[in-house]
Every structure is written in structure tokens, then in C-alpha cells.
Amino acid sequence: MRASLSALEGADIHPLRVSPYPRFSDAASAEGRVVAATRRGKWLSLHIAHPSSGDCELVVHLGMTGRVLIAPSRLDVPHLHAEWQVSTPHPKVGWLGFSDPRRFGRLAFVKKGCYGSLPGLADLGPEATDTSAVASALAAARPSRRPVKSVMLDQGVIAGAGNIYCDEALFSAGLHPTRPMSSLSDEDCRALAHSLGEALELSLRAGGTTFRDYRRPDGSRGENAANLRCYGRTGEPCVSCGTSLLPAKVAGRATTFCPNCQR
């Protein structure tokens, strides 16, 4: 059985060491009984009953290279910025850690639901897996002439849509990543929302996508890379028409598309 964040529910955590680096130091006060493990967009949250402060949250953003680690005992891993002792009957859970080589991640300990110090969390759009809400959000963004992929990557429009899954969704929906948002029809918005939801659900079932840094909390690799039909396949033949996939740069992010299927 693989340990996941949900394995911490009902456990007591106690901080062992937290880095004084400003992006992580807030987590030094995170202790108490874990009530629930949740996710909002690209943010993870442990709802914690703190012994003196009551309902609180340990909030985690992985950034580009962050990893949440769960193990029976302490792991000797590089770039470890925070660690907690975990008390629970679960046989695979005795230690919680957070490592991040590039330190773009974020840890915070806040009163439950109080995200004033975390604007990236406070201003999120609808969940990327909520197809109906995403279609509405895309339709509402149509006055913009920004490229459609740029709008999708905006977490204030859609929460949780990352670079990999935007490429996959645009490919499935037959939409060019640089197409102006204002040119999309209602049908385009619905198709794109559906394709994005499908891409994410497929990845979730496969444990995520690992190329280099991403790992599940138990250290295992995500297996979704084998399902990708577009992202990262520049120069390879399109799985639908055989045309060579082309590269582009959209919103500063590496992008792959089919010039024939995504006109």
C-alpha cells in the first residue's frame, strides 16, 4: 500500500526541524491532530487541530521541485527544509518531510481559511476538474485577446491547470495554443474544459507525471508520462495524423502542438 497525504488523517504531528528560510519558516508552528488532507488547485492543505490555536491549516505549494515525503522513519534526503514526527497506527507513516532543491515551493501555517498572506491561494478560479465551471470561466474570459494557453495557465481563471495538461487538453480539443481567447466559441470552451478534465483525471489515476523531479509522497514515480500524446513530444509524429509536432513558447512556457490538427 502506497502512503498518501490521506494516510495522515487522524495522526498527530510534531515539528522536528523547519528551515528559517522565509518561504518555509511559517511551518514551524504546525503541530496537532490532522483532521483532513485536501487540495485546492496546486496547493495542498492539512487541516490541523492545533492544541492552542484551534482549527488551522498547514498549506503546501510544491513550486517546481518541491516534494512532500511520508515514510515510516526519517529519510536522509537532500534539500530537506521541514520535517515532522508523526504518531499514528498506520504502519507506513511515522515521519513527514518537505524537500525542495530550488526553493520555489511554499509552506505556511494559517488559521483555517485565512489566506490573506497567500494571494495565490486566495484568488483561485474553479477547479480544473470541474468541467461545467471551467467552461463558464473560459467563456467569461473571452473578451481577452491573450493566447488561449496563457489564459488556461492563469490560476485565477482555472485552478490546477499546469503546463503539461494544457498542452494535452488543447491537442485533444483541436485548438492552437496561441489562438486568441476572443476567437473561441461556446462549443470550443466546452470542448476544452472537457479535454482538460479528462487529461487530469487520467493523470490522477496514473499517480501523476514524472519526468525528473516529481514524486508521490512515498517516493514513487508517477506513471502518466506514458499517456501523453502531445506534451514533450516535439519533433515526433502526431498520434492522430502523423505530422511532426512543433515547439512554441507561450506565456514563457515550452509548448508543443500539431500544426495540422490544431489550426
Image: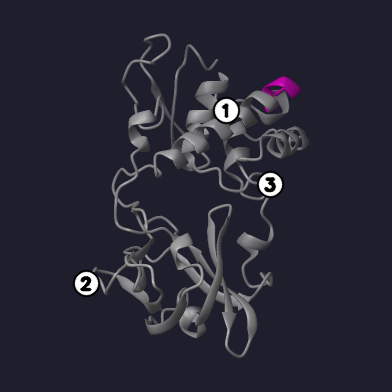
Residue at point 53%, 41% (across, down): 251
SS class, disc 1: helix
Q: Is residue 25 visible?
A: no
Q: Is residue 211 above or below residue 19?
A: above
Specify the amino acid type for callout 3.
Pro
Nearer-N-terminus badge (3/1): 3
Residue under pointer 3 = 126
Residue under pointer 2 = 76
Disc ID at residue 63: none
Q: Is residue 33 visible?
A: yes
Specify the amino acid type for callout 2.
Asp
Q: Work out how far the residue at label 2 is from the one at label 1, CA to CA, in angstroms.
A: 40 Å
Q: Do residues under tags 3 and 1 come within 8 Å of each other at their CB atoms?
A: no
Residue at the far left: name it. Answer: 76
Q: Is residue 196 left or right of residue 220?
A: right
**Magenta highlight range:** 184-189
Q: Is residue 95 above or below residue 147?
A: below
Position in image of residue 158 (x %, y %): 64, 44
Q: Is residue 110 above or below residue 152?
A: below
Residue under pointer 1 = 195
Q: Work out how far the residue at label 3 is from the one at label 1, CA to CA, in angstroms.
A: 15 Å
Residue at point 39%, 44% (across, down): 207
SS class, disc 3: loop
